Image: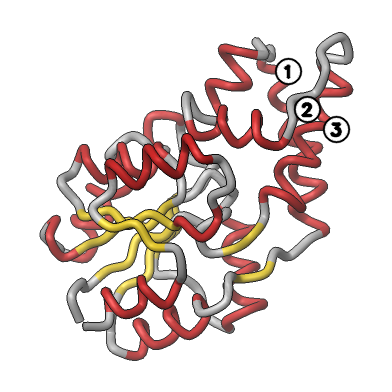
Amino acid sequence: MKYKCLVLDHDDTVVKSTPTIHYPSFVEAMNELRPEVVPYTFEEFVGYCFDPGFHSLCKDILKYTDREELRQQEIWRSYTGEVIPQFYDGFSDLILTFKELSGYICVVSHSERNRILRDYRETLGIEPDLVFGWEHEEHQRKPNPYPLKEIMRRFNLKNEELIMIDDLKPGLDMARSCQVDFACAGWSHIIPSIKEYMYQNSDYYFNEVKELKDLVLL
């Protein structure tokens, strides 16, 4: 195999979840917490998640208080608890084959660890080797380098033995901070400006999961 470890984002990389879970829950929270503001469109929401990121969207743009952030998270958890997102075609086979070949599967996501573990158990019958989710402190979440550094430490890996797969800029920025290869999950992109940025700045840009599989299982 070309790499010993796949570092996977979750939402809109491995599973299709923003249209069915994250965006609807965000709109419901926004209607409650900022009723005077017209809710963002789906494209606007994805754009803000791309840059400056979801945390900054809530804290710096919408200026949620700590209490309001907790309420936003309550609404979000009600959605993530009710819906199990579907894996993109080809990802189940890729992950299971990679594991059978003794590769490490690690997840670095802005979803919560318990939801990620549930999705893997329900769909694949396995758990990732490590999961870094939203429950970590802010400085330990991507785009900060902590998750990648910890993965390399835990499994005694060099940076060239990992590849990060993500659909948005925070994952790209994290990979760059640790000189780790980055592959963009272009199969989820609908916004031309995001697609163009990620195409120009990624080591690999894939439109189909099969292209990723062909790379990592060399």
Q: Judge left or right: residue 66 versus residue 215.
A: right
Q: Residue at x 35, y 90 (%)?
A: 100
Q: Is residue 49 left or right of residue 72?
A: left
* Residue holding disc 1: 67
Counting from the top left corner in percent of width and height, residue 112 is at 59, 49
Q: Earlier in the sequence, mark 2 or mark 3?
A: 3
Q: Is residue 74 above or below residue 51?
A: below
- Residue 27 falls in image quadrant: top right
Mark 2 lies on residue: 71
**Circle 2 SS class:** helix
Q: Whole-percent x and y of residue 98?
A: 35, 82
Which is more foreground, mark 3 or mark 1?
3
Q: Residue at x 29, y 89 (%)?
A: 101
**Which amino acid, mark 3?**
Glu
Type of colouring: secondary structure
What's the CA distance linking mark 3 and mark 1? Answer: 16 Å
User: Which x, y percent locates residue 131?
Assistant: 45, 58
- Could you tell me if the residues under marks 3 and 1 are in contact, i.e. CB atoms within 8 Å? no
Question: From what the image shows, is residue 54 above or below residue 7?
Answer: above
In the picture of the structure, the residue carrying the numbered disc 3 is 28
Task: Give the quadrant of the N terminus.
Answer: bottom left
Per the model, the C-alpha gap separating discs 1 and 2 is: 6 Å
Residue 186 in the figure: left or right of residue 215: right
Please name the amino acid that badge 2 sits on. Arg
Seen at 85% across and 32% down, the residue is 28
